Image: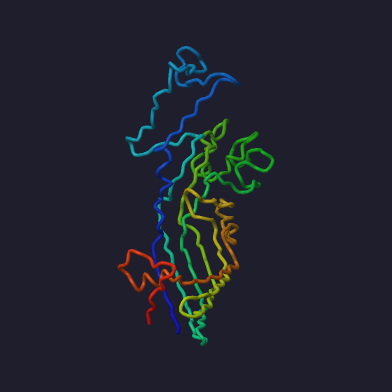
Amino acid sequence: MVRTGFGLTSDPDSMRYLRDEFPEDLTPNYSGTGTGTIAVDPVNTSTYASGQPMTLTYGIPIQTGPNTSSGFVSLPISGSTTTVAQNFSCGYIESWNLFIQRDLGHEWVANVGYVGTHFVRQQVGVSLNAAPFPSSSTTCMPNGQYNPSTGLSGACSFQANTIINQMHCTPTGAGGPVCYNTGGITMSEPLFSLMYKALQSQLSHNAGKNVSLGAVYTYSHAIDFEDNGAGSGAEGTHFNYPSMFRLNRGTAGYDQKHNVQMWAVYHLQVVRYLEANPGSTRLPSPTQPSPRTP
């Protein structure tokens, strides 16, 4: 007997990670002016230049959220968030299988087949704070000095080479770029693919009316660019700069090349009794034999 199948489904990811990101989820952090000092409110400087001490009577300051009336919110330089690409093309999952089943006689049955899964455009979280290796063509060169082509001179930060700062910071003026993001911005994009291939086999045997047993063996290989996709639970890509994306491809962290399982089932007399007496609410006594069915 030959069996085959094919399935196609859309990416089921709910993008739940956007629920807890800026500006929907704000986590203020208050600290003191030194070791062992009480936390201060840096906004209230009416009494102390460093901020008002947050005693029990002072309490926790009322939070002021960002202004969202324009539909746009600026991320603080030290803020972190997760966002999605503007042009988002949702991925899909393909799955297929082909199996051959053969009766070997004497109640032995063998199954062997090929199973495959292909995730096209899997969502992955890519850091926009990634940068290429410093070189003579980057804004901040390997010697820690500004590239003369920027019109600036002096020491620089390698943060100037990151993707987000190259996109939105123009190094002008003696002070250089001042809009660095240091908190971390993750972009969730449907970029990469995932592949799972497996040879699956099964040998089963009916050893009489009450006993069945068998063994299953799977030889497989899972390849991906990032384990568990984007969002919570994601491992994240190791190489985030676009020219290095290909280096993320490799054996998945959950890959298990060999899997062997053996099983056996024995039908108890109680099961046979209930099958023969589906409406019964009492089990037979140890001395009362269960009625046999043909």
Q: Which residue is drawn at 56% across and 19% down?
A: 37
Q: Residue furthest top?
A: 47
Q: Which residue of the protein is positioned furthest toward the front in this rendering?
A: 287
Q: Residue furthest left?
A: 279
Q: Residue at x 59, y 38 (%)?
A: 151
Name the residue rendered at 39%, 24% in the picture. 62
Q: Residue at x 35, y 35 (%)?
A: 68
In the rendered image, residue 284, in percent from the top left (x then y), is placed at 39, 68
Q: Is residue 289 found left or right of 215 in the rendered image?
A: left
Residue toward you, 219 or 253 = 219
In front: 184, or 102? 102
In the rendered image, the vertical position of residue 44 relative to residue 232, given as above or below: above
Location of residue 103 with respect to 269 vertically, above or below: below
Instruction: Return the x and y of residue 85 as percentages of the image width and height.
Output: 43, 50
User: Which residue, as the protein is rendered here, is positioned at the far bottom?
Assistant: 105
Coloration of the structure image: rainbow
Residue 289 in the figure: left or right of residue 241: left
User: The C terminus appears in which quarter of the rendering?
Assistant: bottom left
Q: What is the total number of numbered labels drawn onto the structure image?
A: 0
**From the image, which quarter does the N terminus lie in?**
bottom left
Judging depth in this view, the residue of 120 and 166 nearest the camera is 120
